[in-house]
Amino acid sequence: MNKQVNKQVRRSRRRIAIRKRISGTTERPRLTVYKSLNHIYAQIIDDLSGRTLVAASTTDKALKTDKTGNSKAAEAVGTLLAERAKGKGLAAVVFDRSGFRYHGRIKALAEAARKGGLKF
């Protein structure tokens, strides 16, 4: 099997295993993260109603960054997401890393969201 395909399959299995344990409620919605090669996306989801409450990404017009695929951009997304969540009255979330390692851009986004006032 191709190394890249194998990597995707393993991430997919980890993602499914994580989602079996983690679910977002109205009191503690789920903060999910997706990273591509060039961008990072984060959204806060209420799984009971199936709605996205807050979203932020490096493709947002409100975010002014030169490069979008690095830790500094992920940190800016985490800060923006925490700011938007506070505006909606959300304080506590459950973190869903979507099968990605808690390292680099994922870690930078999570720590920036914590500094912004989200608890998880």
Image (cartoon, grey):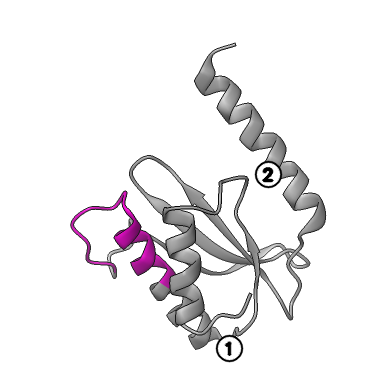
Residue 57's place in the image compared with 14, above or below, is below
Q: Within the image, what quadrant is residue 97 found in?
A: bottom right
Residue 65 among those drawn in magenta:
yes
Q: Position of residue 51 (x, y in %)?
A: 65, 65
Looking at the image, the residue that sits furthest to the left is: 66
Q: Magenta region: which residues? A: 63-78
Q: Residues within 10 Å of mark 1 (few under 14, many from 20)?
A: few
Residue 89 — which label? 1
Residue 107 among those drawn in magenta:
no
Instruction: Please report the residue visible at 61 percent of the width from the left and 80 percent of the height from the top.
Output: 119
Quadrant that contains the C terminus: bottom right
Question: Three-letter amino acid code at disc 2?
Answer: Arg
Residue that numbered label 2 is attached to:
15
Q: Position of residue 67 (x, y in %)?
A: 22, 53
Instruction: Please report the residue visible at 57 percent of the width from the left and 28 percent of the height from the top.
Output: 7
Q: State the SS at label 2.
A: helix
Q: Is residue 63 left or right of residue 109?
A: left
Dot 1 or dot 2, earlier in sequence: 2
From this viewpoint, is residue 13 visible?
yes
Question: Three-letter amino acid code at disc 1?
Answer: Gly
From this viewpoint, is residue 81 visible?
no
Q: Position of residue 102 (x, y in %)?
A: 55, 54
- Residue situated in front as seen by the camera: 59 or 99: 99
Residue 112's place in the image compared with 35, above or below, is below
Q: Is residue 28 left or right of residue 83?
A: right
Instruction: Please report the residue visible at 73 percent of the width from the left and 50 percent of the height from the top.
Output: 18
**Mark 1 → mark 2, Cα distance in angstroms:** 28 Å
